[in-house]
Image (cartoon, coloured by chain):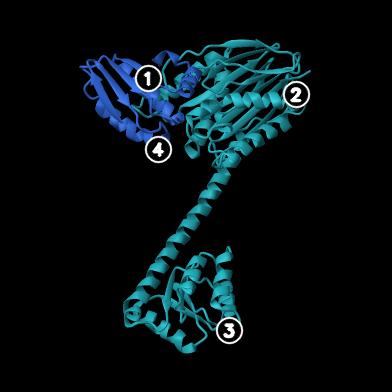
Chain colours: A blue, B cyan
Amino acid sequence: MYNEIIEDRMTIYLEDDLIAPNVKGFNTSVSDYLLDLDVLDEVVLNLGSVENIDSIGVTFVIGLYKSVTNDGLGFAISDASDNVRQLFKLMKLEDLLE
Amino acid sequence: MYNILIADDVAMNRMLIRSILKSKLDNITYFEAEDGEVVIETVKTHSIDLIILDLIMPVKDGFETLQYLKSHSLYHHIPVIVNSALSEITSIEKTLEMGAIEYFTKPFSPDDIEIILPLKVKNALRLHDQNKEIERLNIELNQELKNANEFARFMLPVKSSFRKVDFELHYHPSLGIGGDFIDCVEIGDKVWFMVADITGHGIAAGMASSMIKILFRMTLESPDMSPSELLASINNRIFNIFGDNDNSNFIVFTSFVGCIEKCQLTYSNAAQPYPIIYKKSTDEVFAIENGGMLVGMIENMKYDEYTIPLEAGDGIFVYTDGLFSTGKSSDYTHWTLVKESCGELKSIMKDDPKKFLENIFWKFSFLHKTAGSDFTDDVALLYLSLRE
């Protein structure tokens, strides 16, 4: 997992599957990334490398969404595959998809 | 206190091993055997912790004895150290493959006598202790899971005296106890049902599912409750207790809640795979593709509510994603496979719902096995049909 900041937008790239064994590590990294939010206006979660996702992975995405929006920032998901898009549609979260 | 059995047809060799170990190890009782038959008799009558086994013995040789011990469920765990005059690598390889943990060739070297044999015996006894402890814990854990499984089954709805609908269910927890939840209850002219799938599985998810059953039943006590209000109410109760905890949401679940009243299904869906409706009049199946947010994640969540007219003989099939899920993202579109399967099985679905649930369960079990996997998550299936 790594991040890239361009102007006021941070994009977080996941390099591993969004599944239970990886989520704890993702949470730790994300907490570090979001320590200083003053310069940011939006956080984007890039799922381009995510092939597999499970229910714990879904809670990670929603948890991140909650955390970011609670801090007044925008949140979006990018590069999600069609299957992941279907999943977000099931949860009525299509609006988050770029 | 440990029991060590020394098996060798030559009394002098048995005495030598005994004296080596006696000088280095305490709290040992020694047993002796001059052939394989005596070894087997001894393990049947005494609790042996380690066997030092010669290979060339009369009556039953060391290979046959080792084969017997390792294939017997009561004795396979006893560590065996081979001590033989056979020094060819094939003998060493064969006995180690059969399950012996060490191999010494005769005669013992001074280092074997002074250091290596006593230490290897000591390590083998320690390993045996650990294995016995693991086995004990396993038995204890399995008993606990068995108790929990009985409890989980006790929570399933009982097919008793429903006036408006017939229902069948199939429940398959992946770890003896699971986080899938099914309930169905008739209150006045309404039949309420709920299927939920708690994130994760196992004991924690099982504990959560029992809590959800109580919440479901309690919430139904409120007058004029609708499915969307019921989901919203449970969502807030769960969120208030478990939800606002940084990155951890201890209880999060998908859920489908339906209420059948006057030939009409009113429902709300919180991220459950789309249920399937069977319409008797047109003999067709279709999915109801309306979703919603997981329960327990976001405070004050509102859920959409929909209605579908039903007629006598129509059916509703609700299932959890454990049926088709293997953990891959592509799984999330595999509810379409469920819909296709329902189309193929619709004659069984309408005539014999119990058989339908068994058929669809085994069909997906077969698909999992063909793909080299098995059910990795809990599976809950519910089929309701309106009485004629």
Above or below, B6 against B160 in this view is: below
Residue lying farthest to the bottom in this orientation: B12
Snapshot quadrant of residue A33: top left
Give SS at disc 1: strand
Q: Residue A78: which numbered mark, if any?
A: 1
Find out whether the residues at labels 1 and 3 contact each other: C-beta distance under 8 Å: no
Q: Which residue is mark 4?
A: A21
3D distance between C-alphas at marks 2 and 4: 42 Å
Task: Give the side of residue B388 with respect to residue B379, left or right.
Answer: right
3D distance between C-alphas at marks 1 and 2: 43 Å
Which kind of residue does numbered mark 3 sit on?
Pro
Which kind of residue does numbered mark 4 sit on?
Pro
* Numbered disc in front, either 1 or 2: 1
3D distance between C-alphas at marks 1 and 3: 75 Å
Find out whether the residues at labels 1 and 4 contact each other: C-beta distance under 8 Å: no
Q: Residue B58: which numbered mark, if any?
A: 3
Image location (x, y in percent) of residue B265: 65, 14
